[in-house]
Image (cartoon, coloured by chain):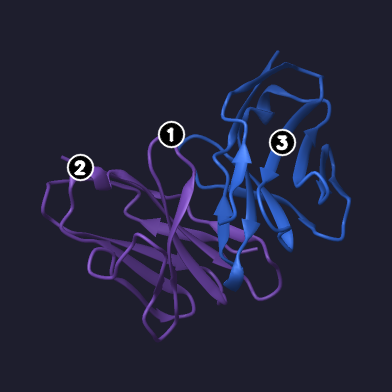
C-alpha cells in the first residue's frame, strides 16, 4: 500500500534562512499532494496543493515541488520567521478524495 | 473556504461510557471526514460521513465502535462508544467543498479516557 514518509526529526533553522521539508511516497504517483500546517492544539490548515503534472507551485514565501521520478515533494519556506514554527504535514489523495497523511515534520525557527 | 466548529472542544470521560462529538460547517459541503490523531502522531482517517446513508469506514474502524451520522450537508456526529484509555486522542472533523480538493479541518476534540 502507498506510504507517505516525512522526516520525523525536528528541523531547527535560524530566522531568515530557507527551510526545506521532504515528503516521500513509496508506490504510485498520486494525482496530487497537499501540504498542511498544524499548530499545537489545533487542526491542520491547508497551505498548498500540487498536481502530478506540475513541477512547482508558489504562494508568497512558500514553494512546493513534485518530482515523480524521485517520488518526492519538497516544501520550502523562504526568509523563515519564528512564526513559521509548527508541524508541517504532507498528504496524498486516495480514491474518493480521502487523504493519507505523513507523520509530519516539526519546524523550529530560532530568532 | 469553510468554517468548522466542533463540540465539545475537550472532555474527560470514564471507561465504558460513550461520547458524541458534533461537527458543524457554515456552508454545504460535498465530503465530510472524521480523523483521529493520537498523541504525537499524524492523522488517521476513521471514516467518510455520507449524507443520508451509512458512513464508509477505513480498515481498523467499525461502526459499532464509531457510529457516525450525517443528516444533512452541514452537520455530522461521531460517537466514540464503550471508551477505553486507548481511545484518548484528538478527534477532528474535516470537509471538502464543492470547488476544491483541499480539506478544511475543525479545531478538534481532545478526549481523555480515564
Mark 2 packing: few (<14 Cα in 10 Å), some, or many (20+)? some
Which residue is at the far bottom? B52
Task: Kindly indicate whether the residues beneath marks 2 and 3 are on one polypeptide chain.
Answer: no
Instruction: Give the x, y percent position of residue B67.
Output: 28, 70
> SS of the residue at dot 1?
loop
- Specify the subunit that label 2 lies on: B
Does label 2 or label 1 sit earlier along the sequence? 1
Mark 1 packing: few (<14 Cα in 10 Å), some, or many (20+)? few
- Specify the subunit that label 3 lies on: A
> SS of the residue at dot 3?
strand
B41, B29: nearer the viewer: B41
A60, B102: nearer the viewer: B102
Q: Nearer the viewer, mark 3 or mark 1?
A: 3
A81, B112: nearer the viewer: B112
- Specify the subunit that label 1 lies on: B
Task: Kindly indicate whether the residues beneath marks 3 and 1 are on one polypeptide chain.
Answer: no
* Chain shown in blue: A
* Chain shown in purple: B
Q: Which mark is residue B85?
A: 2
> SS of the residue at dot 2?
helix
State the residue position of label 3.
A22
Residue sitting at 62 percent across and 31 percent down?
A7
Q: CA distance from mark 2 to mark 1?
A: 16 Å
Mark 3 packing: few (<14 Cα in 10 Å), some, or many (20+)? some
User: In the displayed structure, does residue A25 sit left or right of residue A41?
Assistant: right
Question: In the figure, residue B78 lies in which quadrant?
Answer: bottom left
Residue sitting at 54 percent across and 40 percent down?
A103
Q: CA distance from mark 2 to mark 3?
A: 34 Å
Q: Which mark is residue B40?
A: 1
The answer to whether the residue labelled 2 contacts the one labelled 3, judged by CB atoms less than 8 Å apart, is no
In the rendered image, the quadrant that contains the C terminus of chain A is top right
Residue sitting at 76 percent across and 44 percent down?
A73
Amino acid at each position: 500500500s502507498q506510504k507517505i514518509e516525512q522526516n520525523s526529526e525536528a528541523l531547527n533553522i535560524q530566522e531568515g534562512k530557507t527551510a526545506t521539508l521532504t515528503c516521500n511516497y513509496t508506490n504510485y504517483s498520486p494525482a496530487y499532494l497537499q501540504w498542511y500546517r498544524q499548530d499545537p492544539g489545533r487542526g491542520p490548515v491547508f497551505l498548498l496543493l500540487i498536481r502530478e503534472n506540475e513541477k512547482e507551485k508558489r504562494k508568497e514565501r512558500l514553494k512546493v515541488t513534485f518530482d515523480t521520478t524521485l517520488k518526492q515533494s519538497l516544501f520550502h519556506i523562504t526568509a523563515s520567521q519564528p512564526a513559521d514554527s509548527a508541524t508541517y504535514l504532507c498528504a496524498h489523495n486516495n480514491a474518493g478524495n480521502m487523504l493519507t497523511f505523513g507523520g509530519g515534520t516539526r519546524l523550529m525557527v530560532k530568532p | 473556504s469553510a468554517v468548522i466548529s466542533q463540540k465539545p472542544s475537550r472532555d474527560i470521560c470514564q471507561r465504558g461510557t460513550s461520547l458524541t462529538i458534533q461537527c458543524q460547517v457554515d456552508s454545504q459541503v460535498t465530503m465530510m471526514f472524521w480523523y483521529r490523531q493520537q498523541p504525537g502522531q499524524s492523522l488517521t482517517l476513521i471514516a467518510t460521513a455520507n449524507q443520508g446513508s451509512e458512513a464508509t469506514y477505513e480498515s481498523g474502524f467499525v461502526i459499532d465502535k464509531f457510529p457516525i451520522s450525517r443528516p444533512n450537508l452541514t452537520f455530522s456526529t461521531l460517537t466514540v462508544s464503550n471508551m477505553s484509555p486507548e481511545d484518548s486522542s484528538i478527534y477532528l472533523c474535516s470537509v471538502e467543498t464543492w470547488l476544491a480538493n483541499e480539506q478544511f479541518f475543525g479545531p478538534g476534540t481532545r478526549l481523555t479516557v480515564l
